[in-house]
Amino acid sequence: MKFRGYQRPDKTVGIRNKICILAVDECCDGIARKIAESSEHAVVLTNWYTCMLGGNEETFHQMVNVARTPNVAAVLVIAMGCGSISPEQIANPVRQTGRPVETIICQQVGGTRKSIFLGRKILKKMDEYIDGLKAEEFPLSKLVIGVKCGGSDTSSGIASNPSVGNAVDKLVEMGATCIGGELFELQGCDDMLTERAVSEEVAERIIRLIDNERRRWSVKGTDIETMSIGNCVGGLTTIEEKSLGALHKMGTKPIQDVLQINKDFIDKPQKQGFYLSEVSMLCGGAGVNFASLGAHIILWTSGAAGFNNAIVPVIRVSGNAELINEDIDVDVSGIMEGSMGMEEGGNLILKKVLDTANGEFTSLESWGDSTMTLYQKDQRVEKLLDIPCKR
C-alpha cells in the first residue's frame, strides 16, 4: 500500500505543502497574519509566552521542530527585534533540512508596513517554489499518525475509540507509525499499557511519565477542572472512567517508547510502530505537539465536536448519531445501534486516512482552523514538584 506525497530535501515526506510563518514574539503576530493573507499555503505559529529564551526552551524546540515537520514546505521566521530569540536561531536548524527559509526583523526592515510588504514578496516566491513540487508515490512506512480524543461521551468509549484502535492496529501492520498522547487521560491504565511495552525501560517510562502528568494537574490547593462539562454531560464521571474508554483508541500493538516533549529535547520515532507521547490533552496544543513529532494526520475521536489544525489535517470520528454533523469525517454510530462492527468502523477510518494522505481534504480542512497553540510546561512548577527532565 502506498500514498502520494512530496519528498523534502532531507528525505522526509509531506502530504501537504504549508508555509509556516513563525512569529517568535507575540508583538509581531499581527504582522505575521497580514503577511499570511497573501497565500493560501500560509500558516501562522506565534510564541505567546515571552520574547525571552530563558525558561522558554520547550516552546523554542517546538517552533524549530514544527518548522521542520514534513507537511511544511517553506518557512518564514519573523521577530520584532527587541526580544531574546533571534530568527536565525530557528532558521539555521531549518536550513539544514534544505527547506527554503527566510527571516524578517521588523525594526531593521523599517517598521510594520515595510515588514508586511517584504513578507508578501517572500511568500510569493515560496508559492512559486511550492507550485513546482510534484507528488510521488511512497510506502506507508513514511506515514505518521497522531491519535487523540476530545469532546468525549459514552459513545466515544464504545464506538469511536475502539474503531480508531482497530484502524491503528491495521496501520501499524501496514508499516505506518502511530502516536498516542494525553498521558493524563491514561490514569488507571498503567498495567494494561506496561504489558505492551517492548522493554522494562519503556514500561518504567510509561509509569513515570503518566505520574508526572498527574502531579502537574493535581497540585494540592490549586484544584482545576480536568473533566470538561461536555465530558460530564456526555455520561463520563471521573478521569479514570474516561481513561478506560480512551485507552481503546491506542490499539493493541507493542509500545515502542514514550516520546517526550520538554525543555531539553523533543523525541522522534526511531522506527516503525506504536508510541505513546507527552502530547498535551489540550486540543490546540496537541495539534502543535503532534506536528513537532512529525505527524502527517491526526485521528480525533469525539461525541461530535469539531477540531481542526492548520498543519496536520484532523480526521474526526464520532459514534453519536444525535450530534453528528458535517464536521465529522467518519460516522461509526452504527456500532451504537448494532448495525456496524469494530472491523467495519476501522476499515472506514483506514480508508479516510489513505484518502487524506493522497491529498483529499478532511471535512474541516481550510475551514475554521483552531489556533496553533504553543503549549509548554511551566519550568517553575516543574522545579517545585521536583520533576526531572530526563529520558
Image (cartoon, helix red, strand yellow):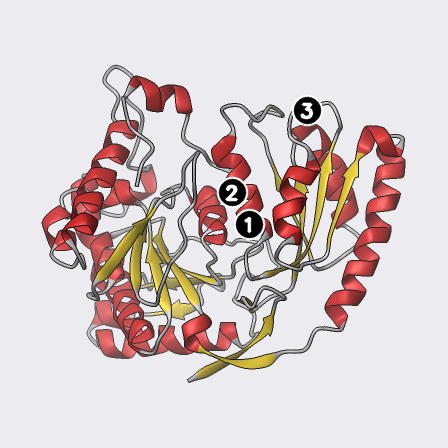
- Where residue 304 sits, quadrant-wise, is bottom left
Image height of 346 relative to 222, above or below: below
Considering depth in this image, is 227 or 115 the residue closer to the camera? 115
Q: Amino acid at mark 3?
A: Gly
Q: Which residue is mark 3?
A: 83
Label placed on residue 66 = 1
Horizontal relation, residue 156 to residue 266: left or right: left
Q: Earlier in the sequence, mark 1 or mark 3?
A: 1
Q: CA distance from mark 3 to mark 2?
A: 18 Å
Relative image position of residue 154 (x, y in whole percent): 23, 54
Horizontal relation, residue 119 to residue 196: left or right: right
Q: CA distance from mark 1 to mark 3?
A: 21 Å
Q: Residue at x 11, y 56 (%)?
A: 195
Would you call the spot at circle 3 few (<14 residues within 10 Å), some (14-19), or many (20 or more)? some
Horizontal relation, residue 171 to residue 144: left or right: left
Whether residues under marks 2 and 1 lie with C-beta atoms below 8 angstroms apart, the answer is: yes
Instruction: Assign a secondary structure to mark 2.
Output: helix
- Where residue 325 sits, quadrant-wise, is bottom left
| Quadrant (top left, top right, bottom left, bottom right) of the C terminus | top left
Q: Residue at x 17, y 44 (%)?
A: 204
Q: Residue at x 35, y 65 (%)?
A: 271
Q: Amino acid at mark 1?
A: Val
Relative image position of residue 115 (x, y in whole percent): 84, 38
Q: Which residue is mark 2?
A: 62
Relative image position of residue 313 (x, y in whole percent): 51, 61
Residue 333 seen in this snapshot: yes
